[in-house]
Amino acid sequence: MEVKTGELRNQLSRYLKRVRQTGNSIIVLDRNRPVAEIRPYVEDAASARSDVWARRAQIEAQQGVFDEDFELPERKTHADKHANPLD
């Protein structure tokens, strides 16, 4: 989600509540350019790991169960035989 600085200034509490409830970040735009990100605060690494599982459960509830039996597309390689991570 993206929000312009003026809208954020006027509705800050609403946007903070949304971040807290959804766990999703908000990109702040100034003159239609990203300048900041508001994201949920994570206490420590253990908490961050548990947040990953909570987020996965949230995604699975919205989009269905993640199926680990899937085929990855074949990666392209360059002349030097190394896979290009951008392909």
Image (tube, rainbow, N blue to C red):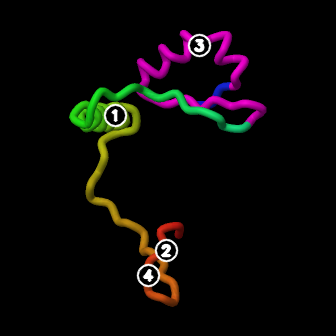
User: Looking at the image, which residue is at 66% across and 37% down?
Assistant: 34
Q: Distance between the residues labelled 2 and 4?
A: 6 Å
Q: How far apart are marks 3 and 1 (CA)?
A: 24 Å
Q: How far apart are marks 3 and 2 (CA)?
A: 41 Å
Within 10 Å of disc 4 (Cα), the crowding (few <14, some 14-19, many 20+) is: few
Q: What residue type is labelled 2?
A: Asn
| CB contact under 8 Å: marks 2 and 4 | yes
Q: Which amino acid does label 1 sit on?
A: Arg
Residue indicated by mark 3: 12
User: Looking at the image, which residue is at 39% across and 32% down?
Assistant: 62
Point out the tag, 3 or 2, that comes first from the N-terminus.
3
Q: Which amino acid does label 4 sit on?
A: His
Q: Please state, as top left, top right, bottom left or bottom right, where the N terminus lies in the image.
A: top right
Q: Distance between the residues labelled 1 and 2?
A: 29 Å
Where residue 10 appears, as percent x and y from the top left, is 67, 10
On screen, residue 19 above or below 63: above
Q: Which mark is residue 82?
A: 4
